Amino acid sequence: AIERTLSILKPDATRRNLTGKINARFEDAGLRIVAQKRMQLSQAQAEKFYDVHRERPFFGDLVSFMISGPVVVQVLEGENAVAKNREIMGATNPANAAPGTIRKDFAESIEANSVHGSDSLENAAREVAFFFAESEIVG
Ligand code: CMP
């Protein structure tokens, strides 16, 4: 089925001017960028977005990192978009990421891992709505 998923290009990616190179990975794989904006997250926004990780030991560092520079938030649309994006990104830890994936090729560490992608269709709907009004998504 045609799905939408929320993608974030993280501060390590914007810092190294990798927006275009990473977007090409999505487009070359057949995903369409149907909404996109560059923004500086506030601490409150980052904490709310990652609320599910609040009790994890890495939560504080994760939030600090995500507000350390601009991010690009985007909605990717296409056949099986949630799973397809996770394939294109590769494993969370770049040390475990398969060759040819974004994280293998670009990520600096498990924290500075260049991209975020929704992990389920249900979370995708929640995460897309966190950043975008329906009117901002143009399919
Ligand atoms: P993301 O998909 O954005 O969701 C939560 C993020 O926490 C994850 O990617 C990682 O970048 C980050 N993170 C930092 N440390 C860890 C860790 N030990 N285990 C899992 N995720 C981590």
Image: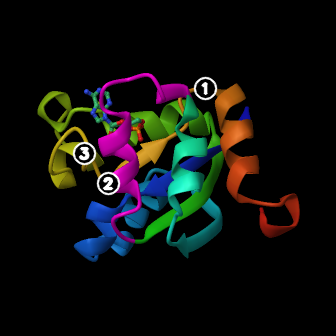
* Numbered badge on residue 120: 1
**Magenta region, residue range:** 52-69
Image spot of residue 135 (x, y percent):
87, 66
What is the three-letter code of the residue carrying label 1?
Ser
Residue at 40%, 48% in the rendered image: 63
Q: Which residue is mark 3?
A: 103
- For image coordinates 22% across by 32% down, the residue present is 93
Q: Ligand 1: which quarter? A: top left
Three-letter amino acid code at disc 2?
Phe
From where the camera sits, is residue 138 visible?
Answer: no
Residue 101 within the segment the image draws in magenta: no
Q: Amino acid at mark 3?
A: Arg
Query: In which quadrant of the rendered image does the C terminus lie?
Result: bottom right
Q: Is residue 69 left or right of residue 74?
A: left
Residue at 53% across, 72% down: 39
Asked if the residue under mark 1 is in contact with the one under mark 2, i.e. CB atoms within 8 Å, the reply is no
Callout 2: SS? helix
Q: Using the image as rendered, state which of residue 46 and residue 31 is in the foreground.
A: 46
